[in-house]
Image: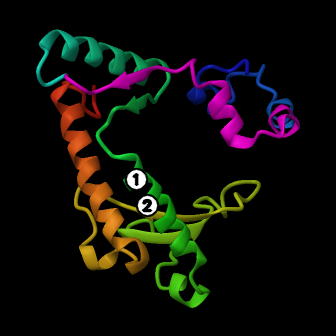
Amino acid sequence: MAATNTDKLEAGIVSSYDRKSELMALDDSNAGVQGLCIKFKDQHPHNRLTGIHDDPILKDDVEGKVRYACEKWGFFHLINHGIPTHVLDEMIRGTCRFHQQDAAVRKVYYTRDLSRKVAYLFNYTLYEDPSADWRDTLAFSLAPHPPKTEEFPAVCRFVLIIILLATFNIISTLHTLGLNKDG
C-alpha cells in the first residue's frame, strides 16, 4: 500500500492509494483478515510485560518499544499479558453463545446508541459508509466506568468479568510505563 498516514488518506491528500487494487489483492489471497494478521505478524512490534515491575532497565526498554509501536504503527501486539489461554478461549465461546441465542434474546441488547455500556449491533457506520460491514458486534464501553455486572449478557457474564478484571490489570501495568492517551 502506498499510503502510510491514514489522516492524509482520509483527507484525500495521498493520491497514490488504489483502494480497489488493495481490496482485490486481499480478496484474491483467499486468506481474509486472518491472512493479513499472519502476513504482517513478524513486521509489527511484540511487547512482553513480564518482569517490568522488578527490573527498571527492562521497564525503560519496554516503555520505549511500546511508545515506538504506538507512534509508528498505532498498535502493538502484547504477549505474556497474564490472561490465561483457557480464559481467552472461554471468551470466544461466550461470545459465540451470545450470537447463537434466539434473536429475541439478542434484541434486548440491540442499539445504535453508542452511549450504552453494552451494545449488540451490526455495522457502527451503516448510514455513513458506502457499503455495509456484514458482521454482528457485541460491544462494551468500559471507560470511564464499566457496565454493572447485571448489564452483561448472562451467557457470557462470568468470563466477561474475568476478562474485565484482567484488562484493568494490564491497563494499570501500561500506565506504570508512563504511557497515557495524550503522550
| Residue 2 relative to residue 119: left or right | right
**Type of amino acid at the residue the image marks with label 1:** His
The crowding category of the residue bearing disc 1, from other C-alpha atoms within 10 Å (few below 14, some 14 to 19, many at least 20), is few
Does the magenta run of residues contain 105? no
Residue marked by disc 1 = 86
Tell me where residue 177 appears, x and y as whole percent.
20, 24
| Residue 1 relative to residue 159: left or right | right
Q: What's drawn in magenta, residue-wise?
A: 25-51
Residue marked by disc 2 = 90
Q: Nearer the viewer, residue 109 or 83?
A: 83
Residue that extends furthest to the bottom in the rendered view of this protein: 104
Residue found 38% across the figure and 80% down from its top: 154
Tag 2 secondary structure: helix
Real-space Cα separation, disc 1 to disc 2, in angstroms: 6 Å
Residue found 34% across the figure and 32% down from its top: 80
Residue found 41% across the figure and 47% down from its top: 85
The crowding category of the residue bearing disc 2, from other C-alpha atoms within 10 Å (few below 14, some 14 to 19, many at least 20), is some
